[in-house]
Amino acid sequence: MHGGHDHDHHHHGNGASGHNHGVPPRAAQWQTPHLPGGHAHDDSHHHHEPDLDLVEKAFVASFSTASDPTSFLRVARIPFEATEASGRRLVLLRVETDGVTDVGSITPQLGGGAMRYDPLPARMVSQRRRLRFVYFDGASPRALSLAEVRELEV
């Protein structure tokens, strides 16, 4: 990501394809790919925070070492009680973080009847941390992403 967009630069003088060379392409959360001219973004129902993926990474890194997790949640403006768009009341039960490592991929075979599995070469293995907020809605626990929590009404 460079200057709000992703592309190769051919001006580094070493013949490489730029700062993206050798890095497998990944979808970045909350970032919209370049759209052809005349196409506008449809943000009518979501007002995404810029770089929310980076905010989430910082939250995961800091929350696990916070001396007072309750105060950390208050500073981060994570509601302990909230109402979702449908009017259902939610109460926060826990914050979950875990590590995820993708070591293989599956792709559908032609005809759709089977799947093909391929282990990923080391350079394509991806690691990330996941963050979920578990709320109780009166009937069952519900895991919400940071983006979903930001859309709750306090």
Image (cartoon, rainbow, N blue to C red):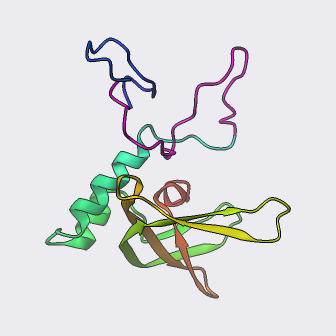
Residue located at (31% from left, 65% from top): 73
Relative to 26, residue 3 above or below: above
Instruction: Give percent across and percent down for residue 132.
Output: 45, 69
Q: Nearer the viewer, residue 61 or 26?
A: 26
Q: Quadrant of the N terminus?
A: top left
Q: Is residue 108 left or right of residue 57?
A: right
In the image, residue 58 sits, relative to residue 104, either above or below, namely above
Image point 65% across, 36% down: which residue? 43
Q: Position of residue 136 (x, y in %)?
A: 54, 82
- Residue at image position (41%, 40%) is 51
Left of 138 or right of it: where is 65? left
Quarter of the image for residue 90 reads bottom right
Return the x and y of residue 38 as percentages of the image width and height.
Answer: 73, 15
Name the residue at 51% across, 77% down.
135
Closer to the camera, 9 or 53? 9
- Magenta span includes 50: no
- Residue 42: x, y in percent? 69, 33
In this view, which residue lies farthest toward the right? 111
Is the stretch drawn in magenta largely helix, strand or loop? loop
Q: Is residue 118 left or right of residue 43?
A: left
Against 13, is 34 above or below?
below
Total numbered labels placed on residues in the image:
0
Question: Is 26 within the magenta?
Answer: yes
Res 138 → quadrant: bottom right
Instruction: Provide the residue span drawn in magenta.
Output: 18-44
Find residue 87 and report its image quarter.
bottom right
Residue most extreme to the bottom: 139
